[in-house]
Image (cartoon, coloured by chain):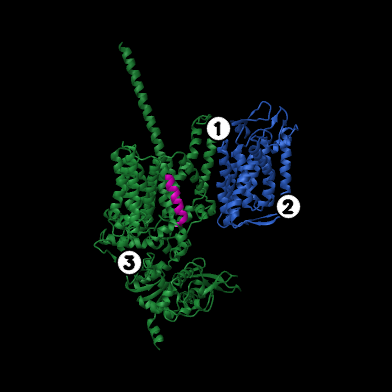
Amino acid sequence: MLIHCMLEEEILSNERLNKILKSFGGLRNASRASVICYSALLLILVIAFTVRLLPIRWEIPSGTMRLNEFDPYYQFSLTNQMVENGLLSPYYPEPGWRNEQLWYPDGLDMSRSLPSLPMTAAVLYGVVSFFGANIDLMAFCALLPAVLGTFACLIIYFIGKDIGGKTIGLFSALFLALSPSFLQRSSLGFFDSELPGMIGLLLFIFMFLRSIDSKRTLFSSILYSLAAAGSIAYFILGWGAAYFLVNLTVLFVFILLLLKRYSQRLLISYSITFGLALFIATKWPYVSLDYMISSAILPVAALFVLLCLAELLRYNINQKTKIYLTIAAVSITVGAIIIMWQLGYMEGIAGKFLTVLDPRIRSDSPLIESVAEHRISSWGFIYYELGLGVMFFLTGIYFTLRNPTNRNVFLLIFGATSLYFASSMVRLLVIFAPAFALLAAKGIIGLLKPFFALLKESSLTTGKSKRRLRRVGKEYGGGAIALIFMLLVLNLSFTPQNGGIPRAITQAYSPITISSGSLPIAPNEPVNEWLDMLNYTNSNLQSTDVVCAWWDYGYWLGIPGNVTSLADNATVNTTKIENIGFIFMAPEDQSIPILAQYDAKYILVFHTVFIGVSQDQANYIASPGIWGDEGKWSWMASISGANRDRFIQNGWIDESIMWTDENDFGSVDTNTGTWIWNTAGRDSTIYKLMSWARQLYTESDAAQEVGVLPDEIIIEPTYFKPAFISGVNISPFEYGGVIPLVALYEIDYESYYNATST
Amino acid sequence: MIVEGKKLFPRRPDQHKVGKPLIPNGLGVIYVLFTTIYLFFVYFTGIVGPSNNVSAPLTLAVCILFGGFMGLLDDWIDLKWRFKAFMPLIAALPLIYFAAESGLRTSISLPLLGVLQFSEAYYFLIIPLIVMIVTNTVNQLGGLNGLETICPSIILIGLMILSSSYILMIVPLLVWLILAGFNFQGKIFVGNTGSFAIGMTIASFAIITDLKLSLIISILPYVFNSVLILLTIFLIRKRASVIFNGKKLYSEHKRSLVTLVTYRRYLTERQVVIIISLIVASFTIFSTLLDFI
């Protein structure tokens, strides 16, 4: 008996041991899968971060990191203000901070800025400083985009995981990490509004989709709604494109209503999210309560009424009342909108956003069209960006359509609308990037899943429709996976449409604008001409000295250059931009009085020169390039020429010499394809300033040494005296035959007045 | 390789052999993998460098990989007609981009008709059409040992003779010929994987090397076959079928090229394959000669 009991106990304990061992085995398997998953994720994030850091190569020689392009300097100046004077200092006390060094004489009202990005940077900078790290603020701001970009990849992993498991999460993180358009706008130095936009967008999608998930408890649903509200408020206060997300969500919820998927949870999440988000956002002076009645935000309220109606209709009330309720609600909504519209309360959507909806409007406005990132993207450009990933994107759409869960419906609307906007405006490809990443990941997994199942199971497959499934071996699964893998390799690593170089690398591995001297080249060494000029203005000019330049360089001059500039990318005053165009295009005699009106002490042009060989092969010839003002002056001519009557009426210029567009200054030689200036062109201020800089270059020692001649006879400007020409002393071959010349001229009012008074 | 192949690959019965022996199917995947690796090699060694920043070998590799993948899908789950017809359009994208970026001619010069200028329509209409038609017609002419491998290789050789960048296709052609040899002896099938991949190869190679006219002429027997099949399906809703009496093939109707050749005529499988190959070869030779004139 005893022995029997002992035996039994032994058997039991053996069973228990087995169970424990098995559960350990299970744990080991589970943890092995998740170890692989998390190491893959970590690897993707490391790749995302390092690819974004590639431009650092051109920053190392100078020992610090600078910001890319132009707008990031504006964000930087806000951050600087916040770090020095407190987070709310640009906005409160009213009327807020006015930066007097920009848009002279009015100054730039910095309280009309969006706070998300500078605040994030200032807060994080505070945290980093608190832990004792002593880092330059500009270097910190330059680094931040890479960090936030990597963070965005992490968020999309979680969104993908919610949509279809870890694998989809991993693939979407990988696609987003290497998406060229997002990469460009989150790599080193690109400290701009897209960053808070993307973070807000992704966080919102993650939180909101979780909040409407009916499987969650009400409490966690409310928590997620609150977080979603915070995210969308962050987006609204970070990037103007928030209209897109707001309306996307409205459209999504509306479609859920149409699909008869209304639930109380939807009403709760929707009202908490938008109520709180708009409450936070409208607290900001720039956004203000007007935001609520702009025609882009009103649908939020209209949909809220519809949701309340849907809630009421769920109750057991008689048919008649239901009909009355419906009619009343719809007519109140429509009536309210019509009345508000008629009374003029409804704010129109800002021009830029309207032009996204209808790109045809844009071609009428040279000011908007002159910005490259506002152009319409062609199919070729989209294919160049995405490659054969388009195939996975399409299959992703197919699989999403076949299984229209709430999340998938959202994904579908997100993909379709963002694709439309991206094809309408190049810059918005960045919003399409996450939709593409998620759908392409879904496509890949959808394609691979059956083959994986095939690989795991025996050679006989079981499926829904046995008739159509063939007996195939495991090898088929392996073959298919190998083919997909190679397609991915081709798409991400040996991009055919980019000559075999990964698209992501060409996007990321180029110097930031200021360190490449504003040339679109990737030299071995940084191009220091612009940096030298800004150093010069910093140490030799007063911060109150007004320097006239085309608007592109306004931020550089006003912020790192520490002088006062007339116009910049904020384009708050289009009349002033027309006037600057006039200054550059008019003959000297006509432009000096306008320069005097603006108290300008200096005028600056950026001129690139190409070094070629003369026809007899005996000499080098310096001729105009394409990347400086010689490529931009036609915009100056057309922007100012569009308002020629104003200049004539003001008495600034005689009607006989006032132009309408660039064709009044010369024409393209049909044989050589080069621009030939006519007399009016040769008389214009911009022509004289650029070509004199080129003349001075050919007279420099570096150019004389190898015998560089100017391409034509050049006359010295009468009233502009060269103060500093950066780049005048570099060897013709330093940057492969391109010479960037940044020329600063002092305006000689004295001789002008002497000449005109006699 | 064959011994291994028998173990590795799924099998399908050979309908036109006594006893219907099981033959390993889907060996086209070998062609796809070898071709891709070879094209990578061509790219890395710089034998054919990128022109206007677009790489020809890699573009070809993408198209062939895609064709192979489509075939795999079709081998496993019979793809619906609408998918088969329109899926090759995706593979047309890299080709359109290649043609647009490297500034290939947008015209086709036809004998008698002269030069047809398509301009933009060439990218958005003609290239997708070529890819769609060639891939699907090549896929449709098959079912006999050797038929689906020998005929495409004849067309490919024709194109290679005319092209200066024949180097892109040398190893792929060799691999395909080896497969064709085994296929002709009835030892393997290349499957839809193979026939879609080779169709895609022919279409994309012709577009990349700008040999549209030669392609159009050599592909005519295929087009004829497909038109015949599709017309009978649409008009009398019947499919072509060939009768096998244990030794020879025979048919009672003319609903495809194979049944046309065997119409009320007893021919062995090999004879049929050789006759059709000769038809294809004559068209290919004609197109090649036309180019030399």
* CA separation in Å, label 1 and label 2: 45 Å
**Mark 3–mark 1 contact, CB under 8 Å?**
no
User: What shade does chain B have?
Assistant: blue
What type is the residue that disc 2 sits on? Leu
- Disc assigned to residue B290: 2
Quadrant position of the N terminus of chain B in the picture: top right
Q: Which residue is the site of mark 3? A: A108
Around disc 2, counting alpha carbons within 10 Å, would you say few (fewer than 14), some (14 to 19), or many (20 or more)?
few
Disc 1 versus disc 2: nearer the observer: 1
The relative height of residue A154 versus residue A680 in the rendered view (above or below) is above
Q: SS for tag 3?
A: strand
The image quadrant that residue A38 belongs to is: top left
**In the image, residue A419 lies in the stretch drawn in magenta:** yes
What type is the residue that disc 3 sits on? Leu
What is the x, y in percent for residue A74?
35, 63
Furthest residue to the front? A320
Q: Which residues are magenta?
A: A411-426
Around disc 1, counting alpha carbons within 10 Å, would you say few (fewer than 14), some (14 to 19), or many (20 or more)?
few
The relative height of residue B43 versus residue B197 in the rendered view (above or below) is below
Q: Which residue is the site of mark 1? A: A468
Residue at 47% x, 60% y is: A360
The relative height of residue B265 versus residue A651 in the rendered view (above or below) is above
Furthest residue to the left? A93
What is the x, y in percent for residue B27?
61, 37
Q: Chain of mark 2?
A: B
Q: Chain of mark 3?
A: A
* CA separation in Å, label 3 and label 2: 72 Å
User: What shade does chain A have?
Assistant: green
